[in-house]
Every structure is written in C-alpha cells, then in structure tokens.
Image (cartoon, rainbow, N blue to C red):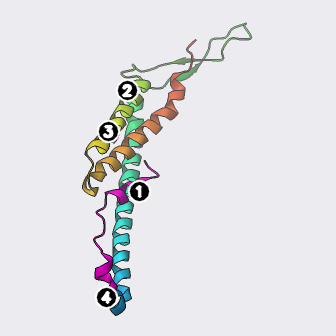
Amino acid sequence: MIASIGSFLTSLLPPTTSSTSSHSFDILLSPLSILSTTSTSDEEALNLRNKHVFILSLTGTIARLLTGISADYLAPPLVAIPAPHSDDPHAPTHLYIRKRKQRLSRSLFAALCAVLLAGVFGWSAGYLQSERGLWVLSAGTGGFYGALFTLSVSRHYTNLNCF
C-alpha cells in the first residue's frame, strides 16, 4: 500500500473529459492549450500524491512515538540483573525480570493494531469511492503500520527466558 499510494490516488481521480473531435480544431489554433490542461491535471495529481504521502509519513511517525511510549507503559520490557554467583559453568550471568506489572502483552498489542489495520483496508475496499475518503486509508495505513513496526522490533525482548 505504501509504495502504491500514487496508483491508488490516480485510480480514484475522475477521468479527464476530453474528446478528440473537440480538440482537433483547438490543436490547429493553439497546440499549447491541450498541453496546459494535461499538465494542470498531472500537477493536481502530483499535489494530491504529495499530500497523501505526507499524511502517511506524519501519522506513521506519530504512531511510532506514541506506540513506543504506550508499549513501555502497558508491557514493560524485561530488565537484566546480575545473577547470583554459582559454581556451575553453565549458569547464566544475568537474570531477566519484569520490574513493573504487565498490563497488556506486546503480542496482543500488535494483534490489535493488525486487526485495526485490516479494518482500514476493509473499509477502503468496500467504501472508498473517491479521493475525498483516501485520507482514511493514508492515515490508517501510516499509523497502524508504524505501530506494528514499532511493536515487531520490541517483540524480541518478550521472548527472553527468565531463569
């Protein structure tokens, strides 16, 4: 979706209403008039693409920041503490403990974000008919993709074995 936002936008734009018969006489009088209408349409499409890439980027950045803070509060990471001395050469050097209560697992948090992202995609597939509603797809994809990316990196810490 992120790489294809321009294609989605172009498919939602209304088709140009130009017929070849009405322009055949205009081309003889002023060939630049045809080029100027085409470039204006292309310029509008480019401006709309830039707008939606900006929305996607902004919501992705905000979601990453908020998700990181929320995940650390709701599912605090494990903290390494030195293990007590042992004569066993295979004994771990550190123990991993959770210093604060876990309110929500990071896996469940990621699953909720994935379900909401699927909801955004479902809504877009079923109800998105024009560029006017494309901001929901742009903002939702940026936000929930950013949240999932943030949580998937931290998932590594939740799989550490506690001894």
Q: Position of residue 151 (x, y in %)?
A: 45, 33
State how far apart marks 3 and 4 are (Cα). Answer: 47 Å
Residue beneath disc 4: 25
* Three-letter amino acid code of the residue under disc 2: Leu
State how far apart marks 4 and 1 are (Cα). Answer: 33 Å
Q: Position of residue 143 (x, y in %)?
A: 37, 43
Question: Dot 2: few (<14), some (14–19), or many (≥20) neighbours within 10 Å?
Answer: some
Which residue extends farthest front? Answer: 21
Asked whether the residues under the numbered discs 2 and 4 touch, taking CB atoms below 8 Å apart as contact, a structural biologist would say: no
The label on residue 122 is: 3
Residue beneath disc 2: 74
* Three-letter amino acid code of the residue under disc 3: Gly
Looking at the image, is mark 3 or mark 4 nearer the viewer?
Answer: 4
Residue beneath disc 1: 7
**Sooner in the amino-acid sequence: mark 3 or mark 1:** 1
Tell which of 86 and 123 is nearer to you. 123
Q: Quadrant of residue 69?
A: top left
State how far apart marks 2 and 4 are (Cα). Answer: 68 Å
Q: Residue at x 69, y 8 (%)?
A: 86
Which residue extends farthest top? Answer: 87
Question: Dot 4: few (<14), some (14–19), or many (≥20) neighbours within 10 Å?
Answer: few
Residue 105 falls inside the magenta stretch: no
